[in-house]
Amino acid sequence: MRSDSGLRTLLVGVDAACERVLAPMIADDELPVLASILENGASGPLESQLPPWTASAWPSLYTGMNPGKHGVFSFCSFEGYDWDVVNATDVRERSLWELCDRHGMRSVVVNVPVTHPPRPFDGALIPGYTAPEDPECHPPGLLEDVRNEIGDYRVYPAGDSAAEYRAAVRSRGEAFRYLTDRFDPHFGFLEFQATDTIFHERPDDEGTIRAIYREVDRQLDETIAECDPAAVVLASDHGMGPYEGYEFRVNDFLREEGHVETVRGGRGMPTWSRVRDSNLKEGDEETTRERGAGERAVAALASVGLTSQRIGAALERVGLADAVARRVPDALVSAGTEQVDFPQSAAYMRSRIELGVRINLEGREPDGTVPADDYDRVRESLIETLGAVETPDGEPVFETVGPREDFFEGPECHRAVDVVTVPADFEHFLSTTLRGERFGPPTEPWNHKRHGIVAAVGAGVDPDAGVGDAHLLDVAPTVLSTLGIPADERMDGEALPCVELEGSRRYPRFENERSAETADEAVAERLANLGYIE
């Protein structure tokens, strides 16, 4: 890697990469490039943020600020009881490439989550996760140029075979190299997402997992050889590992405690499947959609107690649950599901990815049931009650439970949950679904862990200095230091010890002038299939 190369710093994002996942493949000599970066540079564990999930963590990484400042806490944004999948207009701080732009440096960004629709800057951007399949890119027309140059480029793999995963990974590298040759950037950001997705879809498929990582390694090899960056920074947004504890159904617990009210027959707040199957995505009200005869029949059964949950439990006992689920339309399942009645409840978990409980506060929510004078009392009671919950084995479910201000800081804190719940060692799976029991086996046997990985190598990097107690929020100031750009003094992280701090300065806070709905049923469906939306 030459220090006089046009590409000064290449930031490589490998979603969910961590020592647990990488070590066996490195030991088997399957990842020579990743192994070289880790061994020859400064490297170590990278502590993720709360919540340690893709949609919130990547904006934290590329802004250097906690969700209380940038505003993204989950895959969903909420307005009252309504929701939409988050997008770049929900990110209320400047990204690394926007700071580069302010200092006269050009960037190429490929496949980074929550970057659609892109904001203008000097360079090129193809969005990643939460973007639609044919996303708006920067500059306009870029995606067509990329497809003409390298062939098919998809935001999401065409299927879940090893070949389709590898094709998606390969296209990331090919697109990045083409754009680097075309735009001659100072900064590049190349992200690989399939390394996370495979664990949600097929965590036991070691062959495909290894094939994906081998393709990532090949793409890094070709990218470093062709683009010749002066420095490489490698980072993941979180780790990945087995969940060996329990599934804790938070809303079942809150119902038993008198906080959650429920409704049957499909009359509760819409699940993602009802939104997907309705005309909401075209801007119509949910009530304009007429339910079919099948849905009305299932809803009638649910109204007298024969809910989808009870039917599912019976099918599980005879081993038919999975087979039936594959053949039953989501709308039918939803129509027969007992749901949280959000407007009538006092407190509930809306999204497990948020890691916390929302209070239905009067004056804040459209049909708030908790008076403002009771807010502190209700919240303190929830913190005490949830903090005392134990598994059937007598172990604490949560490592810590506390008010949101203990975890987030900044002008967007009001978007966070009221009570933050952190599972003990991230061994327990949180669920919002009502199943009639507090505990069960984890819905997903593998899921996110707090520690990913970070490494830096090349010009301006002192491997002997190490990375210290590296945190996700340290990545942005570290990258800026390798580029000779002062960090924003409002950033919550610091440059890692292995690079010389370039200092900091005050930048004016980003003023978001654009608001857009994601409203893409395919995106919502994919997130639901991966367990991000229940």
Image (cartoon, grey):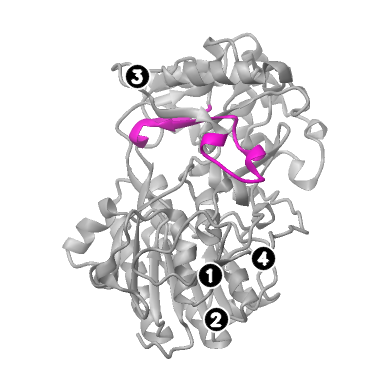
Amino acid found under the numbered disc labelled 1: Val
Where is residue 365? Give x, y as percent.
74, 28
**Numbered tag placed on residue 391 in the rendering:** 3
Residue at mark 3 to residue at mark 1: CA–CA distance: 43 Å
Q: Which residue is mark 2?
A: 179
Tell me which segment is drawn in magenta.
Answer: 405-432
Q: Residues within 10 Å of mark 1 (few under 14, many from 20)?
A: many
Residue 266 in sight from this viewpoint: no
Query: Is residue 193 positioned above or below 219 on the image?
Result: above
Say what secondary structure mark 1 lies in: strand
Q: Are marks 1 and 2 in contact (CB under 8 Å)?
A: yes
Where is residue 299? Give x, y as percent.
67, 19
Q: Which residue is mark 4?
A: 118
Residue at mark 4 to residue at mark 3: CA–CA distance: 44 Å
Amino acid found under the numbered disc labelled 4: Pro
Q: Quadrant of the C terminus?
A: top right
